[in-house]
Amino acid sequence: METVFRNARIVLADEVIEGSIRIADGRIAAVDAGPSAVGEDFDGDYLIPGLVELHTDHLEGHYRPRPGVFWNPLAALQAHDVQIAGSGITTVFDAVRIGSDPEMPGMGDHVQVLVDAIAAGMADGRLRADHLIHLRCELPAHDVVADFERFADLPLVKLASVMDHTPGQRQYQTVAKYVLYYKERMHFSDAEMEAFIADRHAEQALYSDKHRKAILRRGLAAGIAFASHDDATEAHVAESVEDGVSIAEFPTTLLAAEQSHRAGLAVLMGAPNVVRGGSHSGNIAAADLAREGCLDVLSSDYVPGALIQAAFMLPELTGNVSLPEAIRMVSATPARAAHLTDRGEIVAGQRADLVRVRMHGDMPVVKGVWRQGVRVS
């Protein structure tokens, strides 16, 4: 069986052409400029590669929709999958946190439940998108290395990030910012907040460096791609480069973003940051990094629909990013950074992971999604 899409504005790696594509056996067989008399008429809509999402916590929100409420994991996964695919995302790395979390006791058990659900969902063909797993490793947690060992060899685990949310550095560059975020959320008194911060500093001193080394050594040997998280300084970037990290997630300063990009790391920022016009935590704006030429990847983070919206917003917001460049940030570049070489571009031989997009004013609307040539949304 062959499928042909015609009369489409096809977003290629470096240009947009009007033409048609032919799909055979789940892959793109040909891309042709100009009119065609056969195939499904796209009526001038955009045809872009399926989006590749490296970092989304969205599944956790479906699994735990309220504090203390845990949903059936497969039902949660299916609800997440519908929204992911409906947003044009054909490959998603579902992020799960490993290492003890004071906000969510027993996190290790919950991670196992979610990982098992993702594996079951992929095995029985119920999912629209291609789901892989991103392990978010909280380095100061005493049990994070043991948790990593549990999951490192699973076939779906393709990406891990090394994180340290200790107050006074990286995301929380001042203790005051950390207190502002956590005190009300955790319902702490002043004394309880002070003790909580002291415990976090003690754990960091005891565990963070040795856990980072152990996890990177083990993960790189298993072929897992790695991301740093919230790099802020020259020292952070130098450490990431030395460690063999390929992605710089959410750098908090222009300096860290510029140096990461220059060193060949794919600089990843949140698409909600673009859509909202800045970071919700007051750090560097993603659009500013794009204007400086050091933004490589966008991630939907906590709003799946933000990914395609941000990609179509960036050209007008920045003036120096073309639509093909913006689409690469949500397709080919994240795919390559995560060691996926078979998707992310509309070119002969690649997987036919494709999205039909119609513009309504300045808002992109997903009108159709295909994964390996099969319509899934």
Image (cartoon, helix red, strand yellow):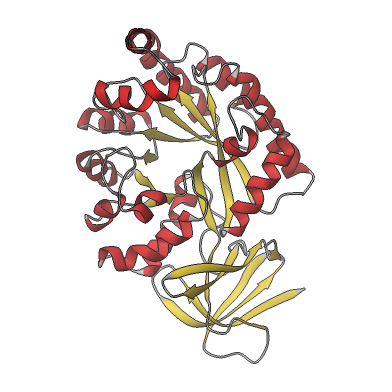
Expressed as whole percent of the image width and height from the top left, the position of residue 329 reads 41, 56
Quarter of the image containing the C terminus? bottom right
Whether residue 66 can be seen here:
yes
Label tally: 0
135 sits left or right of 193 in the view: right
Most foreground residue, 368 or 176: 176
Q: Please say if 215 is above or below 41.
A: above
Res 71 → quadrant: top right
The residue nearer to you, when weighing 99 against 193, is 193
User: Residue at (69%, 27%) from the top-left corner?
Assistant: 113
The percent coordinates of residue 311 (x first, y second) are 41, 61
Q: Which quadrant of the rendered structure holds the N terminus?
A: bottom right
**Is residue 283 shown left or right of residue 141?**
left
Q: Position of residue 10 (x, y in %)?
A: 50, 76
Identify the residue shown where x is 38% and y is 69%: 323
Residue located at (62% from left, 39% from top): 62
Is residue 164 something one can see in this rendering?
no
Specify the quadrant of the image occupied by residue 290. bottom left
Depth check, front residue: 274 or 15: 274
Q: Position of residue 67 (x, y in %)?
A: 58, 27
Above/below status of 218 relative to 312: above
Viewer-side residue, 264 vs 377: 377
- Above or below, 61 against 22 in this view is above
Residue reaching furthest to the right: 124
